[in-house]
């Protein structure tokens, strides 16, 4: 049985109460490089996004979930399936843990494992992919520990602080048993 509950965290749908949490992530310039964001988002736009968050993944082509501690409702981070392609049974996957104190404690690992399981067993996807800056050792380690393989590098792909950075494409293909 597929579950979105792990040992120390669970994944839940976004709620209207997540407005300030999402606002703080989307407007944090320190993580714009990871989220490929260039401009801030208004509370108005985020409120509109949350109002439409009830859309089915097949309609929205995206599923964004809050990562929460098992004993609470407060979000620690976000994990996404995006660019869902139901014909080819694939989607992109991304994760962000907002505060440093929750990183490197297994939160991201547990969340990623839950969403991979959900994508392959509930959504019946064949493959997942992730775009990761070649210098982001923590993300590369996280994804490769789940079997994601680097299949290519996009040279000078992202411009950050007037420098171009390479971005690697990682892929995980579900092996049917």
Image (tube, helix red, strand yellow):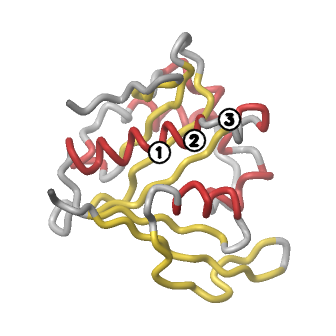
In what element is the residue under mark 2? helix
Q: What residue is shown with label 2?
A: 108
Picture layout, residue 153 above or below residue 91: below
Whether label 1 touches label 2, CB < 8 Å: yes
Q: Residue at x 67, y 74 (%)?
A: 134
Closer to us: 83 or 103: 103
Q: Position of residue 135 (x, y in %)?
A: 73, 71
Q: How many other residues sit within 10 Å of disc 1, few (<14), some (14-19) or many (≥20)?
A: many
Residue 32 % position (x, y): 71, 56
Decide: few, some or many residues near mark 2? Use Cα within 10 Å; few <14, some 14-19, many ≥20: many
Q: Earlier in the sequence, mark 1 or mark 3?
A: 3
* Secondary structure state at the residue bearing disc 1: helix
Q: Tell me which residue sits at (46%, 72%) in the image.
A: 149
Q: Please state which of the two labelled residues, at mark 1 or mark 3, is closer to the viewer.
A: 3
Which quadrant of the structure image shows residue 10?
A: top left
Mark 1 highlights which residue? 112
Q: Secondary structure at mark 3?
A: loop
Across and down, in percent, residue 139 comes to 63, 58
Q: Relative to residue 130, is residue 58 drawn left or right?
A: left
Quarter of the C terminus within the rendering: bottom left
Residue beneath disc 3: 105
- Residue at 82 percent across and 81 percent down: it is 163
For marks 3 and 2, give the one nearer the viewer.
3
Q: Mark 3–mark 2 contact, CB under 8 Å?
A: no
Establish if 112 lies above or below 23.
Answer: below
Distance of mark 1 from mark 3, alpha carbons? 13 Å
Label 1 vs label 2: CA separation? 6 Å
Rounded to the nearest angstrom, the CA distance separating label 3 from label 2 is: 8 Å
């Amino acid at each position: 049985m597929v579950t979105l509950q792990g040992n120390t965290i669970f994944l839940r749908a976004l709620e209207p109460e997540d407005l300030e949490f999402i606002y703080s992530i989307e407007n944090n310039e320190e993580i714009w490089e990871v989220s490929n964001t260039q401009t801030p988002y208004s509370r108005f736009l985020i409120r509109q996004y949350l109002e439409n968050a009830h859309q089915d993944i097949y309609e929205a082509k995206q599923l964004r979930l809050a990562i929460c501690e098992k004993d609470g409702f407060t979000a620690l981070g976000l994990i996404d399936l995006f660019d869902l392609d139901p014909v080819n049974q694939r989607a992109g996957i991304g994760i962000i843990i907002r505060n440093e104190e929750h990183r490197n404690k297994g939160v991201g690992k547990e969340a990623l494992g839950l969403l991979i399981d959900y994508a392959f067993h509930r959504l019946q996807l064949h493959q997942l992919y992730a775009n990761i800056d070649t210098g982001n050792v923590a993300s590369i380690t996280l994804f490769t520990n789940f079997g994601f393989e680097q299949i290519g590098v996009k040279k000078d792909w992202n411009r950050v602080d007037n420098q171009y950075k390479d971005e690697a494409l990682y892929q995980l293909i579900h092996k049917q048993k």
